[in-house]
Amino acid sequence: MKIAVCIKQVPDSWAEKKMGSDQRLDRASVDAVLNDLDEYAIESALALVEAHSPTGEVGEASGHSITVISMGPERATESLRKALSMGADDAILINDDALTGSDALATSKVLAAVILAGGYDLVLCGTESTDARMSVIPAMLAERLGFAQLTFAGKVALNGTTVNISRQTEFGVEEMSAELPVIISVVEKINEPRYPSFKGIMASKKKPLVTKSLTEIGILPADVGSAAAWSTVKDSLPRPPRGVGVKIIDDGNGGSQLVSFLAERKLI
Amino acid sequence: MSSVLILVDSVGGKVSKSTAEIATFGRRIGSVIAVVCSSDAAIIVPQLADLAIDRTITCTGVEFEKFSTGAVASALAALVTKESPTAVLIASSARGKEIAGRLAVRINSGIITDAIDIDSELIATQSVFGGSTTVHSVVTHGTPIITIRGNAVEAFHASPGTNAPVHEDFSVSYDGAGGADRAAVLSVAPAVKGGRPELTEASMIVSGGKGTDGNFAPVEALADALGAAVGASRAATDAGWYPHSFQVGQTGKTVSPQLYIAAGISGAIQHRAGMQTSKTIVAINKDPEAPIFDVADFGIVGDLFTVLAQASAGVIAKKS
Ligand SMILES: Cc1cc2nc3c(=O)[nH]c(=O)nc-3n(C[C@H](O)[C@H](O)[C@H](O)COP(=O)(O)OP(=O)(O)OC[C@H]3O[C@@H](n4cnc5c(N)ncnc54)[C@H](O)[C@@H]3O)c2cc1C
Ligand SMILES: Nc1ncnc2c1ncn2[C@@H]1O[C@H](COP(=O)(O)O)[C@@H](O)[C@H]1O
């Protein structure tokens, strides 16, 4: 089986983020890390392969492969290397100046093209990127690829060519099933991502990591990037700081003072 | 006159509060056409009569529950062609965003998610980076698809009998039904409903964290005194003290109530990402340095058990 995992490099979620003069996130000013929610997708891929490998290990002997795919700038190779050091087999970065400013429609178009060309049967994603926070890429990929959509999975099992997941939605706990090819997004409750081992880090340096341009994946520059972004930010402003809050130390009357505060704000 | 399509959201045949809210936004833009894609349509449509809705359309011919969000996106796409609306508005639930994303691909249109406001010119307001920045965006291509967060507006309700939306059925088919969308829902164990309001719909929430040490009784007592929903931090849900569906935060629910009370919650960035846009925030924590105090309008440094107990008694006394 050929598995693809879509991962994104994002600004560190602990860093203070601000908008640049071009009304886009000022990425240069913050540290970049692998989107932590995508680590769960990588771990799921590794666990699936280990469960279906004759040796219990990932890699060539397993008869399966895991490719990590990212669209982003050159420095996203850091995140791809991290995934390789966790155990993925190879990596593809789609990097092209024309991609700057791409919206979710363009991102999904690019990722779909790479997934189709690679002939993957099972695609794993995180549930959201901590910077864009749209949670739309997996559904868009399912729509573009015509793969079955199994999103927000809290459990994933593969049986032959059938994938079963269970997930928590507003309707309750749903058990779902689909035949390959499928696109799955996993929630962070699904597993505990492993740390790359020293051996894994050394091995990752020799694993293939290819960078592709738009031409190489057959997409026209005019179809992506800021000119083809079909929503634009008109303006942005730092949220007015919350009026300086009151902080009291409970002297035995804290609960009553809270009630007075709520009454003052007409909340009760 | 311009029209707006809104997608009716319901759980177990009950129309959710978000539907009333997106209808209210829709009226700012044009006449509102509410679209029902559910086998419970017969009991859903009557519940729409008093909302800011001018027409209702039930999509027939597809058993929507059998498919993923692709079937609903396909029905909406057909209605966009038929009605040429100015915009499509959908609730910002996980499901709502998936439908919006698939619809955007299908009709080749721009999409904005998690708006907290929209004006008559379709300028959407979003709160990004964990609430630290406010952004105004517009869709520049196709039929704007905008998903809207809960509690962003006071929903309009007509006095009973004064509003009479015109109803029609619209027959749709789904191209994914044969092959592509074969994800089958095998079973659904419905969420157990307590007497408390739904987390994402509640106008008040009292949340408990690790500091409760597993004892949610005082959190629930204050919630019940206020008529509020109960929420929890991930530390509390991971410990099994409260079900995962009550988790607030980046990987739980994003909430924006009038009042959010955090008791025994430190205020990690992942928690704040889900509650920072609440109108009024109260924090109770014994650690004066806890980061939750940075976003609190009213902070109490103290023991949550004594503070909550006293507050519950005070609220009950005030209300009676
Ligand atoms: C990928 C990822 C996703 C995550 N998603 C979420 C999410 O969606 N939601 C979420 O909440 N977290 C999330 N987290 C976890 C988050 O980072 C924190 O670990 C979590 O929010 C901590 O929960 P807490 O505040 O209850 O516990 P702690 O951080 O342990 O804080 C407990 C607080 O209680 C106080 N306290 C203890 N006893 C008392 C007492 N008697 N009276 C008053 N105060 C007391 C302490 O001073 C302390 O500040 C995520 C983490 C990761 C890595
Ligand atoms: N630029 C990207 N490259 C690769 N995968 C991505 C990219 N953006 C988003 N994804 C995937 O889509 C998921 C949802 O992201 P989003 O829709 O941006 O919230 C992420 O968890 C990733 O798995």
Image (cartoon, coloured by chain):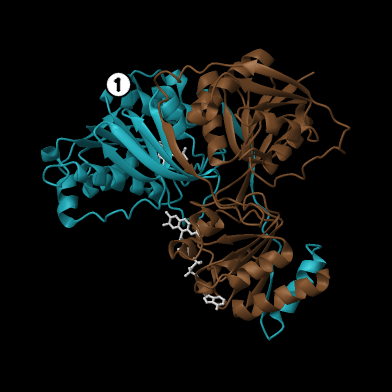
Chain colours: A cyan, B brown
Residue B167 lies, in percent from the top left, at 75, 22
**Left or right position of B248 against A141:** right
- Crowding near the residue tagged with mark 1, few <14, some 14–19, many ≥20 C-alpha atoms within 10 Å: few
Picture mark count? 1
Instruction: From the image, tell me which residue sits under label 1.
Output: A216
**Residue B228 falls in image quadrant:** bottom right
Seen as rendered, the residue at the extreme bottom is: A251
- Residue B204 in view here: yes
Residue B247 lies, in percent from the top left, at 52, 56
Which of these two is toward me, B85 or B287?
B85
- Residue A244 in view here: no
**Left or right position of B56 against B160:** left
Figure quadrant of the N terminus of chain A: top left
**Residue A5 falls in image quadrant:** top left
Which of these two is toward me, A201 or B314?
B314
Figure quadrant of the C terminus of chain A: bottom right
Mark 1 beta carbon near ligand 2 (under 8 Å): no
Q: Amino acid at mark 1?
A: Glu
Q: Residue at x 58, y 19 (%)?
A: B77
Q: Please tell me whether mark 1 sits on a helix, a strand or a loop.
A: helix
Q: Is residue A214 above or below residue B245?
A: above
Which of these two is toward me, A74 or B296?
B296
Q: Is residue B152 above or below residue B37?
A: below
Q: Residue at x 80, y 75 (%)?
A: B317
Q: Residue at x 49, y 26 (%)?
A: B70
Seen as rendered, the residue at the extreme top is: B82
Q: Chain of mark 1?
A: A
Residue B82 lies, in percent from the top left, at 65, 13
Residue B152 lies, in percent from the top left, at 70, 45
Q: Residue at x 44, y 35 (%)?
A: B185
